[in-house]
Amino acid sequence: MSILVDKGTRLLVQGITGGEGSFHTQRCIEYGTKVVAGVTPGKGGNQILGVPVYNNVERAVAETEANASIIFVPPAFAADAIMEATDAGIPLIVCITEGIPVMDMVKVHSYLKGKSTRLIGPNCPGVISPGKCKVGIMVGEIHLPGNVGVVSRSGTLTYDVVAQLTSLGIGQSTCVGIGGDALPGSTFVDVLKLFNVDNDTKAVVLVGEIGGTFEQEAAEFIRGEMTKPVVAFVAGSTAPPGKRMGHAGAIITGIAGRASEKIKALSAVGAMIAPNPAEIGLTTKKVLDGISA
Amino acid sequence: MSQFGIPVPRGKVASTPAESRAVAKEIGSRVMVKAQVYAGGRGRAGGIKMADTPEEAAKIASCLLGTRLVTHQTGAEGVPISRVLVEEASKVHRELYISVLVDSTTRLPLMMASEAGGMEIEEVAQAAPEKIFKVSIDPAVGFQPFQGRKLAYGMNLTGKQVTEATKLMTGLYQLLMTKDCCLAEINPLAVTADGGLLALDAKLNFDDNALFRHKDIQELHDEEQEEPLEVQARQWGINNYVKMDGNIGCMVNGAGLAMAVNDLIQYCGGSAANFLDIGTLNTTDRVVNAFRMFVADSGVKVVLVNIFGGMARVDVIAKGIVEAYQQMDIPFPVVVRLAGTNVDEGKRILSESGINFIEAEDFYDGAHKAVQAAKGQIK
């Protein structure tokens, strides 16, 4: 098993005819992902990379039975694209787009309420279940199939973490980038819940960063319900308060947003804290050795 | 704020002492002269002063204008004062606090009110959390009168003030939604001697991602209030640059990795001169411009390039580094760690170029060598 995406995933690409959309569609197909449809309003009826393009998501789902969507639509139109896919009943939406206004996401969350669609992102690298399916923009080759789940607010830092794991021979069940925005569709807690009941996942690596209280909420969940060991790192110990560190959500606006507070919360519930970002792989190895010993 | 029905003191912005005098004269009573800067804590730092006469207002303005204000929210170098606000002084009976923001836990707008105004809300949250009242707002129906009453009674307002406060909060919520703010805060909200409400000071944080649909707010932007190197970075297309105090200039792709590089440098005993997320690129210009930034920053003694190519291609970064060496004199050692998409091609470009750089094996090695180079232990 794995979580969110696997061999049964039938992917639809919203914004497939754009530069990034087509580039990454190609990469996903090369990785083995079944890409069944693309949507670009006004370009319906065409084919790109051998994938049929539709004018809207509803039609694409009706004809191809797509069960996941990845979104590459520009920020001003991305909220609309998320709601369109939700309306079409797609159970999993992965939104790559960076720069969606916060108020647009408030509306999206309000729209998603009571519906069964799960949103990952926006402003994220996507989801990969190594050896099975890639719904994202991450480099496929650095991954190795295995039993460690990875969940992260970052993109490239996650690549480094995955490369560390792979070089130590530690494979991954699924890697989920929840994104760097202030209002992500899924939080650490949402993804930890899935890893907690996934038979293939033996331990989880959580990569947090400054801003918000997602790591503290994760700590609460770990304390109460998590049955698997968690390795954690929180980026931004050296970030100055009040400055937006690249990600829209990575800004220390209060005490709880500091890396030290998050590390304290995670450490208090038994998560193993990596001493520095280059030793996340080694810390995971120690934890896994501890389980099998 | 007044566009949204929020009562504010009468006043105008002035950029010379003569203008300040004229505004004070027009108001015709005692005035406050307030330095207009992007920082809180102005009162304690001497940036807000009272004037009984127009002459006095002009005198205060001439003392403030052209100087730099240092508050607990600015660095030691402070921020320049190029404008002052001259406004009617009010007789304040009580100071309250009201704000509305987007709460990341509920993903809904959250209105907060407290009768402990005039101090920072986080201090209140720690010292007297029972004094803070909160309501979540459903964006489908907006801010409701019952929510306003709940917060108003929580601040111990009575009679007509309750209706007035509800109207004010409704206006503040509309401001948040209409202008795409992440935070709209009134602190203090004064209860005046005659029982009225008046917003004496406010802070609005606008969502950078939404500025494309608010030309009016973009025009309010005052670059003089910012760190000059950060302004320069934006002009050169580097949008994610934050100046810091150390001596290792960093160029990284991705915000999380960039923060982690800075953390790792500190772990290795050094400190970063900046945070720089180069982003995803298809051309070398931004890499060359990043090197221009490092050369322009007199604090930089070493540069660390750490790239894990995903969307960003390592060979493009490598070409950019070579071009930077060709275009300018690089007076400091450069440590380079490359990994990810097209890494072999990137490494080949660097080694065949003949430029003098320090190659790093991995993430840790890069930070470690940069710290060593900063201490003069390797070159």
Image (tube, grey):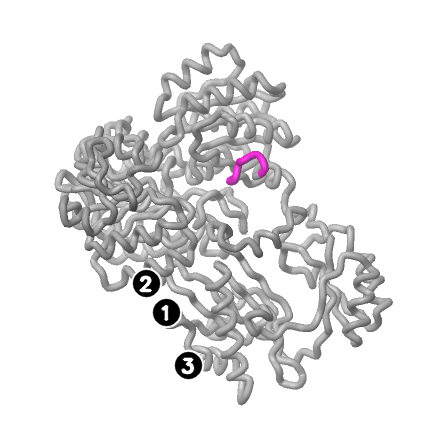
Does residue A71 appear to the left or right of A1 in the view shown?
right
Q: CA distance from mark 1 to mark 3?
A: 13 Å
Q: CA distance from mark 2 to mark 1?
A: 8 Å
Q: Are marks 1 and 3 on the same chain?
A: yes
Circle 2 Cα neighbour tier, 10 Å, few/some/many (<14 / 14–19 / ≥20): some
Q: Which residues are magenta?
A: B235-240
Number of the label disc, if any, that sits on residue A110: 2
Q: Which residue is mark 1?
A: B138
Whichever of callouts 1 and 3 sits on the residue coming sooner in the sequence is 1
Q: Is residue A293 visible?
A: no
**Of marks 3 and 2, the one in the foreground:** 2
Chain containing mark 2: A
Number of the label disc, if any, that sits on residue A176: none
Q: CA distance from mark 3 to mark 2?
A: 21 Å
Number of the label disc, if any, that sits on residue B146: 3
Q: Position of residue B74 (x, y in %)?
A: 64, 51
Cβ–Cβ under 8 Å for marks 1 and 3: no
- Indicate the quadrant containing the N terminus of chain A: top left, top right, bottom left or bottom right: top left
In this view, the residue farthest toward the bottom is B159
**In percent of the image, x 30 and y 52: which residue is there?**
A82
Taking A40 as reference, is A30 above or below it?
A: above
Dot 1: element: loop
Dot 3: element: helix
Chain containing mark 3: B
Viewer-closest of B221 and A41: A41
Figure quadrant of residue A155: top left
Q: Amino acid at mark 2?
A: Ser
